[in-house]
Image (tube, rainbow, N blue to C red):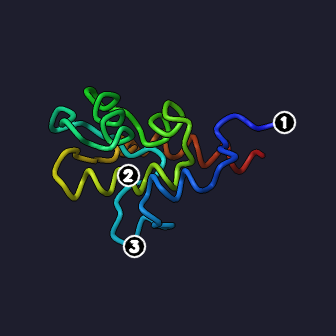
Amino acid sequence: MSRPGRDDAPDRLYTITGGRSGAGPDNPFDLVTLVVAESEPATGMQSEHAAILRLAESPVSVVEIAAELGLPVSITKILLGDLLAAGRVSARHPYRPAITDPDILEQVLVGLRNL
């Protein structure tokens, strides 16, 4: 019995990434990084790259792309790194406003102390 999102043929994953097993230390992608396509898929492009560009027409997270493609996140990060290096996608972390209201922080602190 196979698990969803797992590929029983590791040689397929090896082929997709060109034998690379890691995204590299300068890869900016984590699970919640938002990816946006900067171009349309080109003729002759690797099918996974083209699928990512179609998925990323509007902002989409790395984990959503991996789920849609049925690939491990590590493989998806490698493919996204290729597209980023080619200027075909842009990446950013979701905007999350900082909590600066001291009253809210005080309430959180009191709540934690009550645990």
**Which label belongs to residue 1?**
1
- Depth check: 25 or 41 in front? 41
**Which label belongs to residue 79?**
2
Q: Residue furthest right?
A: 1
Which amino acid type corresponds to the residue marked 3 in the rendered image?
Answer: Pro
Disc 3/disc 1 C-alpha distance (Å)? 35 Å
Secondary structure of residue under mark 3: loop
| Residue 97 in sight here | no
Q: Where is residue 106 in the image (x, y as percent from the top left)?
A: 53, 46
Q: Name the residue under label 3.
A: 25
Q: Position of residue 43 (x, y in %)?
A: 19, 35
Residue occupying the point 40% across, 43% down: 99
Of circles 3 and 1, the one toward us is 1
Q: Where is residue 17 in the image (x, y as percent from the top left)?
A: 43, 57
Residue occupying the point 33% across, 70% down: 26
Which amino acid type corresponds to the residue marked 1 in the rendered image?
Answer: Met
Q: Where is residue 57 in the image (x, y as percent from the top left)?
A: 25, 27
Cβ atoms under marks 3 and 1 closer than 8 Å: no
Secondary structure of residue under mark 2: helix
- Depth check: 101 or 19 in front? 19
Q: How crowded is mark 2: few (under 14 residues within 10 Å), some or many (20 or more)?
A: some
Q: How many marks?
A: 3
Q: Residues within 10 Å of mark 3 (few under 14, many from 20)?
A: few
Secondary structure of residue under mark 1: loop
Q: Which of marks 3 and 1 is nearer the N terminus?
A: 1
